[in-house]
Image (spheres, rainbow, N blue to C red):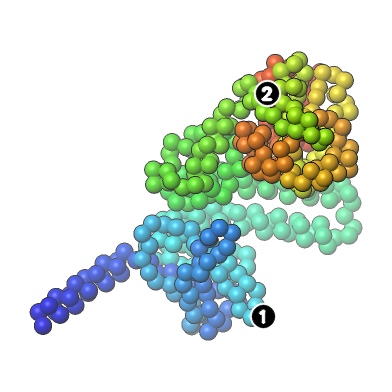
Amino acid sequence: MKKLTYLLAAAAVLAACNGNKGYTVTGTVEGASDGDTVYLKKVEGRQLVSLDSAVISNGTFTFKGVQDTAANRYITYAAQDKEPLKMDFFLENGKINVSLTRNNDSATGTPNNDAYQAVRSQLNGLNAQINAIYESVSTDTTLTQEQREAKGQEIEALQDKSISILKDAIKQNITNAVGIHLLKQNFYYMDVEDLDPLMPQIPAAYDNDETIAKIKANVEKMKATAVGQKFTDFEMQTPDGQNVKLSDYVGKGKVVLVDFWASWCGPCRREMPNLVEAYKQYKNKNFEIVGVSLDQNGDAWKAAIEQLNITWPQMSDLKYWNCEGAQLYAVSSIPHTVLIDGEGTIIARGLHGEDLQKKLAEVLK
């Protein structure tokens, strides 16, 4: 009897401790009905995997449990004949209040969620503006081409503002789960000046995180190929199968623009007329372009070269994102350009459109 009493007392203490340390997620879902099911999920690879479920009762749902460390998780809702909804938040011990909606999700009540919500609220506001502009462009048939271009510029400005908000949030939260999550999701928007100061601040708990390790390695590559550094050489093949090195073109007196692109990349194809114009204007003024393709299919690569009127040298190893040149130059999105002077020193990176034209006019005057 004494043993049973002792076990009951120990269980009560454990339950009390778990209650104090655990989480309670309470929320509402826009458009949901009592009896509908909400799921708590995590990301595994490219899939969302269910961890728990809760039935909506009296308009709310509740999840309870214990979480060792704060982790990014999803709440999803999908009922028959109703719009599916999902949002991410940070599952951590404490009382978390969730509102799952079409346009203005929120999760608050714990430190990481409050920090994440501050970012989400700003981005939701900008996304609403962007969506409104998209809708006006798609529905207003009276808009002139100039007006459409102006609205496109408005969208780009709002997207740039969104990226700026994300960068600031990463810097402010780099020592916690929010900053690490945002960094892993958005590092490709950041250059070496943004990233390098953040690396020493990342908590040791993330030393074995695969994505963080990749980012740290990329930062070192970015530093090695940053503006002011000598170019890094690599060897690939031309469309007709001949081996060629970047050094066959770079460091021989000409200003060289290295263009990382691919036939499957829509933004690359849209940018190509700008490069065609630049090549036409400067090819006889000590200027060369070298295309580095991240294609996998040689026929698609060759077809795009012809379709896009590309007349400058091309090389590729047909390894997609494992392209050796892209790896060496820490290229995480395309199109991406690297401008190198006649002595082989990198003088600019990531220039496109009007910015590229201005830089070429400056160095090739």
Q: Is residue 363 left or right of residue 325?
A: right
Q: Is residue 53 left or right of residue 31?
A: left
Q: Amino acid at mark 2?
A: Ile
Q: Would you say the residues marked 1 and 2 are in contact, meaning their CB atoms lie under 8 Å apart? A: no
Q: Residues within 10 Å of mark 2 (few under 14, many from 20)?
A: some
Dot placed on the residue nearer the N-terminal end, 1 or 2: 1
Decide: is 79 above or below 222: below
- Residue 284: x and y in percent read 87, 20
Pick the front one: 7 or 23: 7
Q: Residues within 10 Å of mark 1 (few under 14, many from 20)?
A: few
Decide: is 204 above or below 43: above
- Residue 309: x and y in percent read 89, 37
Mark pair 1, 2: CA separation: 56 Å
Q: Secondary structure at mark 2?
A: strand
Can residue 359 be seen in this snapshot? no
Pick the front one: 50 or 363: 50
Decide: is 50 above or below 341: below
Task: State the residue lying farthest toward the left.
Answer: 2
Q: Which disc is residue 347 wearing?
A: 2
Q: Quadrant of the N terminus?
A: bottom left
Q: Residue at x 69, y 44 (%)?
A: 320
Q: Which disc is residue 89 wearing?
A: none
Q: Which disc is residue 81 wearing?
A: 1
Q: Quadrant of the C terminus?
A: top right
Quadrant assignment, res 16: bottom left
Q: Residue at x 61, y 22 (%)?
A: 229
Q: Amino acid at mark 1?
A: Asp
Pick the front one: 232 or 284: 232
Q: Residue at x 36, y 59 (%)?
A: 68
Q: Is residue 362 left or right of residue 13?
A: right
Q: Residue at x 64, y 42 (%)?
A: 322
